[in-house]
Amino acid sequence: MTTSLVPGLRLAGLTKVLGGRTIVDDLSLDIAQGELVSLLGPSGCGKTTTLRMIAGFLAPDSGSIAVHGDDVTALGPERRPSAMVFQNYALWPHMTVARNVSYPLRIARRPRREITARVAEVLDLVGLSHHADSRPAQISGGEQQRASLARALVQRPRLLLLDEPLSNLDAKLRVRVREEIRDIQQSLGITTVLVTHDQEEALAVSDRVAVMHDGRIEQVSTPADLYREPATEFVSDFVGTSNRIPALDLGDGEPGAHFMVRPEDVVLGVDGIPACVTRVLPHGPFTEVALMARGIELRAFVSGEAPATGDDVRVRFARALRYVDGILEQRTAPRLAEVAA
Amino acid sequence: MPDAARSFAGRAVVMVLIVLVGVFILGPLLWLGAHAFATEWTYPNLLPEGLTLDWWRVVFDDPALFSSMQNSLFFAPLTVLVSALVCLPAAYAFSRFEFPGRRVFLIGLFATNAFPKMGLFVAMATVFYGLNLMETTVGIVIVHVIGTVVFMTWIPAAAFSAVPRSLEEAARDAGAGRLRVFFAVTLPMALPGILVAAVMSFLASFDEAQGTYLVGAPSYMTMPTEMYSLVLNHPRQVAAVFAILLSIPSVVLLLLTRRYVMGGQLAEGFQIR
């Protein structure tokens, strides 16, 4: 099969300038067929603009977009093989759920029997069969979300675009719906782009996550790699939290060098450098401990018995990543006491 | 106990206010209604002396009055149609496109209503004489349409703006072209606002008297223009009958579109943005 070698989505040198500001800056990304890739980043990083260019609502200033090998850069959104789920669901209030879902098929002038069958099938898939004749205003936010997903899936798109699809749902529902979306996406094998600012969401559902910053992709990795080996200080700080320690404080004289240490890699024990506990914040499954060691503020996640505020302890780092000028350089596990001694 | 007393007093005040407002609104209508069927009803008498349908006969038998009704029912729908054709595209443009002078045009439409109409009509009459538009259908329609421009642009513009762009984008994403999106999503969603604008325009045209009189009289007399001479030349019972006839379309239209007019569309339409 040669088709599987063709990427489901290929973005090449995508650039967009809006109001004199470069929103998306020479962005390139390949997404394999059937893969779910998240665009993750803070607001204003260009992720939504990128998605809107993929959908066809915005024309890129330069660069190209190809879906399954077909260049779609010049096509309007109505002619692209992609379907989008909007942040606010964008259901048409004057149509029932079934009418909303059938709309793409009616536009495509599919035979009536096929429309009925496909709408029933997709409503069943998202669990909305009993609301087929309801109006969007009569169903809950989560159900509107599913209706919107159904309207996208009924088109059997080659590319599914999800624009912050969960941000309007409450926390519990969000977790459930994101698992459902992931299940459906995997069972149908649709190439999917998910835009989100929620790192937990991105890590939980994606095959790979692309972290965006200032219109560029900082790193594309599997969720595990992204967390364990952030390519830049920005990623390390944005995905999860990290202690940023100037290398100088560890006896490493190179200018611009920093160590990034995950809070769970800060180990409290009997050896290492002396530190003072300044604050203890229980989180339930673990306890967050704020420390002061030789003038450096540190945060540690402790899963067992936690010290009390004011205790004197010793810390060492189980794992630290070294960055020079913000870029990952090498992995080390310095013991602060040794280096500083 | 004091609470109960206070709430009773409060309710009593509210009731009195309701009655007062009711009298204020319904009183004149009752007066009109009674006059339209009364043989004679003058000051000291509490009730009309007798009941008759004669005054209605007078109105319907008078060819001038009857043709004025026909004229009114001809000009009002025509005005709405022409106004819609001219103004709705403008409303859409105001709502969806940024162009230089957008605000100036938008405020300008409103500002034209700030000047006394009569002065405007006199100036227009001069132009109309030059263009041979005096006493023509076209001339009257122009005068009427001018009176509806504000309704027909501002309210639909607000209605178009109230349609979220993502709903239009969703339709394009689903495969609809621009025109199709307009007719499948934008127009149906803006329709209540457009309907309100159409009703307001119909009523504005139906009630327009000054300009119609200046441009149309004596060839084209509408109901409001006939009203002037009617009040002077006929017993007041005839005027009452005619006033009732004049108000029928307003009442019917408002009842038909009550749902939309009450729904806050009007208030939304006049939000200045």
Image (tube, rainbow, N blue to C red):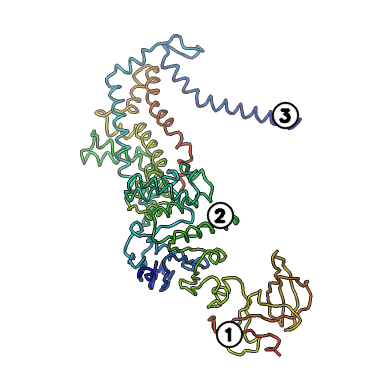
Q: Which residue was labeled with disc 3? A: B5
Residue furthest front in the image: A1
Q: Earlier in the sequence, mark 1 or mark 2?
A: 2
Which marked residue is nearer to the observer: mark 1 or mark 3?
A: 1
Question: Identity of the amino acid at label 3?
Answer: Ala
Q: Does label 2 lie on the same chain as label 1?
A: yes
Question: Identity of the amino acid at label 1?
Answer: Ala
Chain identity of mark 2: A
In the displayed structure, would residue A107 be above or below residue B56?
below
Q: Does label 3 lie on the same chain as label 1?
A: no
Q: Which residue was labeled with disc 1? A: A257
Quick one: SS at disc 3? helix
Quick one: SS at disc 2? loop
Nearest the eye: B236 or B195: B195
In the displayed structure, would residue A331 be above or below residue B59?
below
How many residues crowd mark 1 within 10 Å: few (<14), some (14–19), many (20+)? many
Q: Which mark is residue A169?
A: 2
Chain identity of mark 3: B
